[in-house]
Amino acid sequence: MAQGPEYTGATSRDEPTWREQEQLLLGEVMRLVGKSLAPDMVFREMLHLMSELLGLNRGRIVLLDALDDGMGRPLAFDEGASIRYAYGLTKAEIACGRYAVGEGITGAVLATGQAIIVQDIDADPRFLSRSVQRSQLPPETVAFIAVPIELARKTVGVLAAHRIRRRNRAISEDVAVLRLLATLAGQILQLRQLVAAQTQALQSKNEMLSKALESATARYGIIGRSPSLLRALQELERVSRASASVLLLGESGTGKELFARALHLGSDRHDGPFIKVNCAAIPDTLFESELFGYEKGAFSGASTSRAGWFEQAHQGSIFLDEIGEMPLAMQAKLLRTLQEGVIVRLGAKKEMAISVRVVAATNRDLAVEVEQGRFRQDLFYRLNVIPIRLPSLSERREDIRPLAMHFLNKTNQQNQRNVHFTAQALEALEEQAWPGNIRELANVIERTVLLTDQSTVSRKELAAWLPDAKPAAQRGKQDMLHRPAMARVPLIRDYQPRNSHDETELRKAMDLHGGNQTRAAQSLGLTLRQFAYRWKRLNQR
């Protein structure tokens, strides 16, 4: 291995040349520090340049064994030290470089924190020649310089190198350069420890948070561990015990009802009722009576009094899904209830105090609805106290597989099936766009389980049930051509008389589907109840 100018002599060099070499050395080291604080890269190149530019050969950095420059652990100063970085030494020589504190020149520097200059290694009995035998060094007089490396005002290491003593460069100048480099090495180690300690603290905090959120997913029945889902859960956990209204935002099918129930379960009202109301399913004329109830005789047909959804949710939570569908006239009454905490039954003459936590949800942009006059601005501000955005399924692709397995197991259990997906089929699910989000995924899984003839669904077979990006008309033609006959069974079956299928058809369907009545019924266009009735009559003959 090249050893720099040690073997060629330096007598031809004058003072300015040494200065230029020093400046080049320091400039290159600082450039490396600017790129990275990783000790491996900086220290090894530093030792290399010491040899090539200044003739300080076989440079090594010795650090206490208890010093971990990556994890920031406490230092123990009564342990030994070893060579961690070197240039010009073989692996075997580096392995020999172990020292007890106080042992030899290196150990003495560790013990005292003072630099030691050995003018002639042959004349100083403290020099151990532990790493490199004297026979491996030049026959000339060899000097050895060792300077301390400090970390937090404690000596934790040594920067040392060999030097041919007979040169036209003063040894004091080499000592000055080594002190400067040792100071820089200590600062790099300190910065490295600070960064490592902060990183470890953040990692610990993230692990604790992830465990907490994962336990929350199990607690609330929410499946997934994607960052976007965990962020939404983190927001949910922070506000679950608050009394302010929460507005859940997100596309249709992202699980807003599940999050609303999770907010209820995580609140102090978890022992109270949880009432869910789909505003899109209530006719405009019935909104007030549905939400606030009515008294006997309030309108034609009101033969008894009835408590509305808000009254039933007293001391609990009410989930107003699709809040954007609520008519403007009803929005004003809802705002009064939210502001004053009272309701008035339809036909009643007095107010009724209630305590309800309101969770609203919408897939509309309510700010746009406000601008276009379809939603009251004051109600929007009242509901939008704590907005939580639920991620779409395309934003949490790592959750598609566990969600698919959940729906697969659930559908198998409910229908007494034993259908499995291949790894390639699960990959196909992960590649889908899923504009309908989790609801669409669940529907595809259920449809596949109920209509497939295979116990193991491959990617090719699954493609028959997956939505595609083609126009609806073209997609419909393709479905008729390529999908199995069972897929064309209408969702709403026509009325079938009890003698619609003869014995041969029934038995053939059962044989074809391995005795599974559900699949046999589907193949004949019958409901399970219709098929079971015919099969029972057949076997009673």
Image (spheres, rainbow, N blue to C red):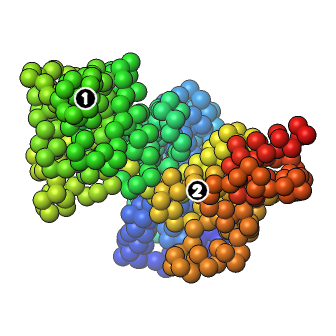
The residue lying toward the viewer, choosing from 232 and 76, is: 232
Mark 1 or mark 2, which is nearer the start of the sequence? Answer: 1
Residue 61 position (above or below residue 210): below
Q: Name the spot of residue 397 as percent of width and height, x first.
A: 53, 57
Q: Name the spot of residue 103 as percent of width and height, x first.
A: 61, 34
Residue 492 position (above or below residue 77): below
Q: Marks 2 and 1: CB-CB under 8 Å?
A: no
Q: Amino acid at mark 1?
A: Ala
Q: Name the spot of residue 179 as percent of width and height, x first.
A: 41, 52
Quarter the C terminus occupies: top right
Question: Residue at the location (59% across, 29% down)?
Answer: 79
Circle 1 is placed at which residue position?
302
Q: Can see residue 229?
A: yes
The residue lying toward the viewer, choosing from 355 and 158, is: 355
Q: Can see residue 179?
A: no
Q: Is residue 522 left or right of residue 371?
A: right
The residue lying toward the viewer, choosing from 72 and 380, is: 380
Circle 2 is placed at which residue position?
492
Q: Amino acid at mark 2?
A: Ile
Compute the Cα span from label 2 to label 1. Answer: 34 Å
Question: Residue at the location (62% across, 58% down)?
Answer: 494
Q: Examine the image and state in which quarter residue 532 appears.
A: top right
Q: Is residue 424 left or right of residue 349?
A: right
**What label does residue 418 carry, if any?**
none
| Circle 2 or circle 1, nearest the eye | 1
Q: Name the spot of residue 204 as percent of width and height, x first.
A: 47, 36
Count the marks: 2
- Local packing at callout 1 (Cα closer than 10 Å; few below 14, some 14-19, many 20+) is few
